[in-house]
Image: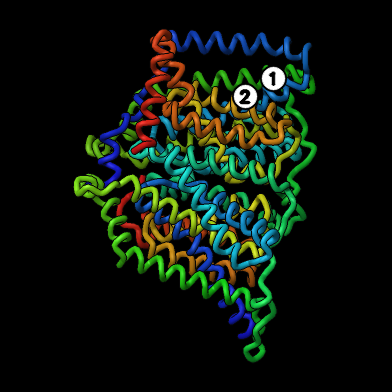
Amino acid sequence: MVETFLRATLLGVQLGMTLALIAAGLTLIFGMLDVINFAHGALYMLGAYFGAVIAVNLGSFWLALVLAPLLVGLIGAAIEVLSLRPLYGRNPLYHILLTFGFAIMIQGAIVQIWGGQARRIAQPDLLTGTLSIGSLNYPIYRLFVLVVSTVLIAAVWLAIDRSNLGILMRASAHDTEMVDALGIDVSKVFTSVFVFGAVLAGLAGVLLGASRSVNPGMGMGIIIEAFVIVVIGGLGSFRGAVYAGLLIGLVTAYGALIAPTLTDLFLFGLMAVVLMIKPNGLFGTTEAA
Amino acid sequence: MSALDYLRQRNTPRTGNQILSRSGRLTLLVGIAILAALGPVVQSVQPFWLNLLVRMLTFALLALSLDFVFGYAGLLSFGHAAMYGAGGYAAALLVTEVTASALVVLPLAVVTGVIVATIIGWLSVRARGIYFAMLTLAFAQMLYVVAFTDLPATIAGMETVTGGDNGLYGIQLYELFGIDFRERLNYYYLTLGIVALSLAGIVRLANSPFGRVLQGIRENEERTEFIGYDVQRYKVIAFAISGGFASLAGALYVPFQSVANPQLLHWTVSGELVVMVLLGGMGTFWGPMLGAGLVVFLEDRLGSVASWEVILGSLFVAVVVFAPRGLAGSIITLRNDPRAAIGNAKRALENYVRKVRG
């Protein structure tokens, strides 16, 4: 009983941190660019596919973990410069349509290029097997995912909070005109934010692609979960995304113990309750869109 | 000044409000007449296309219902699949268990949709913008899970209610004044008639004082509230009306396809619907209907082309970037000044290049 509970908790925290990693990119892009990025799930999926291809052809999980997110970042840069940049300032609804279009496009392209069947990224030998603590068995790879996600989230948090680039990003979002007047190319800052978000999505794709399957449905599946997290946490709030990610991870893990088929009902129910009590999410400050 | 405000200043203003003018109505009447005449032609040339036309019409009705709350009251519903599916399931259950009479089933399906929409609307209207969208999405997804796991059967201790994952099969077609709807052309006319009536009803509503209040809410919620309107109540009523029309679309679709499955309620339906409305041009009614028809048509036609999703996605992207007011906006501009079309296109392209360069 206690063991099941502990297992579920560990699983929930691990799931929560990876979800938070995905949601972090989404919330950063919204918070700074005011863009609701529906293509985030597709970028995550691209990360997983690039990862799978690199891991098979170059034979190294570690290379895949580094190269795939960079490739996704490149695609993110192209999307931002060629389509989002001309649209800033328009009603945010157009970003939904635009990025939804990209989501469909990327999904179609993936099926076209790699076919419809599922594949898997091989876990590195170093990380296979299970770890036993007392009577609790836990796959090492999952622990690795937990550690990497946590470290990454902490790093991103610190970067936004402390680094010069982070301060510049926040300043650009807060008062674009002023930053522009100071002689800084705001559009480059915006591009970096979007690319940064895309890289995080790609990273999550590779990480999860080695423990779940890589398939053409994964993008659309994850995007709604990520939206739930971002909304519960409060759109644009990084802290909110992390807390809400953990919350959703735990609810999913515990929900799976009680009624596995109804976990989605718990998730959406939780989101509905949160929004009815706090219409701007847990840590949301301003009203969005 | 926030980033958004700053950038808004530099960019084009949003679309204005167009309510159907007299010439617009005439065009629509002609359009409906053409569609009516098209039926027998399609029937004799390629009968399968009648199915496609019916599907296009039901989605046009669904897009119309969304445009009423979205384009007029400014409520972005991301959960319209809830009412669509509720109407569909209601029709399926009524037809199999009670009666196949369209005069009974269709009104009851609409009532079901209105009830579902009232509950969802009442629980969601306090939140605004994207949060409202996400709440409606949440409720729709909850209904999806309920239908998918057949929760009602579990609770009531029955064998099956929604049919779970598989859905409900073999839904009979409607009966109405002894007309044989297995004759596809008849069903096409039934659908066309209902869609045309719905459009007339919605245009009337939008032109009524009630519709003006909704526009007021869209343009400036605080001001409308300050004048003394109960904004929340108006929103809930608008949402309920919209839900009624959405469920009508579901109730027309399900017996025609003879299947009601959870897929009707899935969020991707709502998502595609929003795309159809924006693609067509929100707030014009005819634009979103055109958008919906076009998307359904293209999905069907391009389905045989392997990369149809890529084509469809590119089309969406191109429309958003180059025709922000949707197809309707482009058509209006083109009609107002056909000779300026080339110049406009050139300017749009130059504008685009300038903005990309930053």
- In percent of the image, x 41 and y 25: which residue is there? B349
- Asked whether residue B245 appears in the rendered view, the answer is no
Image side of residue B322 versus residue A117, left or right: left
Q: Which residue is mark 1?
A: B188
* Precedes in sequence: disc 2 or disc 1: 2
Q: Chain of mark 2?
A: B
In the rendered image, residue B313, in percent from the top left (x then y), is placed at 57, 36
The extreme front residue here reads A58
In the rendered image, residue B335, in percent from the top left (x then y), is placed at 43, 11
Q: Which residue is mark 2?
A: B57
- In percent of the image, x 56 and y 37: which residue is there? B272
Residue A235 image-quadrant placement: bottom left
In the rendered image, residue B120, in percent from the top left (x then y), is placed at 49, 46
In the rendered image, residue B225, in percent from the top left (x then y), is placed at 26, 39
Q: Nearer the viewer, residue B79 or A188?
A: A188
User: Could you classify mark 2 by the number of other residues whose Cα lies within 10 Å: few (under 14), some (14-19), or many (20 or more)?
Assistant: many
Q: Are marks 2 and 1 in contact (CB under 8 Å)?
A: yes
Residue A104 image-quadrant placement: top right
**Cα distance, mark 2 to mark 1?**
9 Å
- In percent of the image, x 37 and y 55: which residue is there? A236
**Amino acid type, residue under disc 1 in the picture:** Tyr
Residue A119: which disc? none
Residue A196 image-quadrant placement: bottom left
- In percent of the image, x 71 and y 38: which residue is there? B92
Q: Chain of mark 1?
A: B
**Amino acid type, residue under disc 2 in the picture:** Leu
Q: Is residue B207 positioned above or below A148 on the image? A: above
What quarter of the picture does the C terminus of chain B occupy?
A: top left
Q: Nearer the viewer, residue B283 or B89?
A: B283
